[in-house]
Amino acid sequence: AAATLHRALALSDWTKTIRRDLHKCPELLYNLDETSAYVRKTLDELKIPYVFPVATNGIVATIGTGSSPCVGLRADMDALPILEEVEGPFRSRTEGKMHACGHDAHTAMLLTAARILKEREAQLAGTVKLIFQPAEEGGAGGLAMVQAGLLEALPKIERVFALHVWPGFPAGTVHSMPNTIMAAAGFYHANFIGHGGHAAMPHTTVDPFTCVATAQLGLQTIISRNLSPIDAGVVSTTFIKGGSAYNIIPGTVE
């Protein structure tokens, strides 16, 4: 373990270069032509065989004996539709797209793991599959790779390991806990339909903003009054859209 950590630290500049290269070319969901090509080029340089495409732009590389036991290591590759406002030499080259969730780091870390494992391939008593996944951000890319046969291809993956960078923890530490850490996500989208009118005469309207304000507070009782106090959950409202003028109560709010 100490030797592996020492080698990983020795490759830190190589890892940073990959991460910054990928940070400059953020792509969304399954549209990962440049990102996927970069990963495949790196795997080619490392002489690591892979299967491509898996779920459009996904990649599954293999290191080891080609037989069981088989472990999977997974990283996601897609970015987010966010404008990067920070200036720097490796700032996003595509306006409105940014690696704001750290998937560029995940991919760089998995490629570094690939390099270290390839160097020690003769010592492996089984197989490691490196899973480069598209469309983590709302595109169900993991499910798409499973449906494409990821878990059925021989040797069958017996365990999968993944991680996520986290800005609140000190660098160089790994944090975990028993049972579930992350959670599944569901979404809600509501249109409140009232009756618009002049803001000076609210009694002649059905104000959808009042309904939205009440609903937004009431939604929190889903957690506080429907979930066990020892379980975890969160409901967040992330956008409210409505209205166009200071003196008009709108008819609808989204």
Image: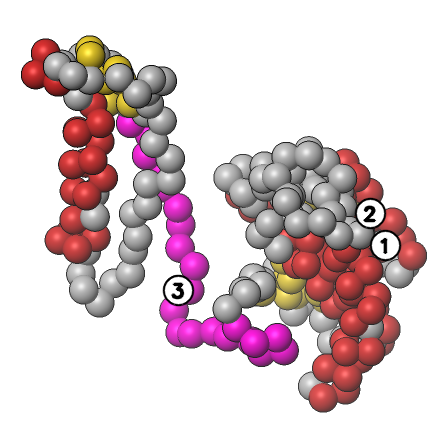
Foreground disc of the pair 2, 3: 2
Residue that appears at 71% across and 64% down:
109
The Cα–Cα distance between marks 1 and 2, rounded to whole angstroms, is: 6 Å
Q: Secondary structure at mark 1?
A: helix
Is residue 105 depicted above or below 22 in this figure?
below
Q: Quadrant of the N terminus?
A: bottom right
Magenta region's main secondary structure?
Answer: loop
Residue 44 location (% of width, % of height): 89, 53
Dot 3 amino acid type: Thr
The Cα–Cα distance between marks 2 and 3, rounded to whole angstroms, is: 33 Å
Mark seen at residue 42: 1
Q: Secondary structure at mark 2?
A: helix
Residue that appears at 92% across and 57% down:
45
Residue 150 location (% of width, % of height): 63, 48
Characterize the local packing of mark 2: few (<14), some (14-19) or many (20 or more) Cα atoms within 10 angstroms.
some
* Earlier-in-chain disc, 2 versus 3: 2
Residue 28 location (% of width, % of height): 64, 37
Residue at the far left: name it: 203
Do we see residue 235 in this rendering? Answer: yes
Pointers 1 and 2 in contact (C-beta within 8 Å): yes
Residue wearing tag 2: 38
Camera-nearest residue between 171 and 57:
171
The Cα–Cα distance between marks 1 and 3, rounded to whole angstroms, is: 33 Å
Residue that appears at 86% across and 73% down:
119
Residue 141 location (% of width, % of height): 57, 42
Dot 1 amino acid type: Thr
Residue that appears at 16% across and 42% down:
218
| Side (left or right) of 1 relative to 227 | right
Characterize the local packing of mark 3: few (<14), some (14-19) or many (20 or more) Cα atoms within 10 angstroms.
few
Mark seen at residue 180: 3
The residue range painted magenta reads 169-190
| Side (left or right) of 54 relative to 115 | left
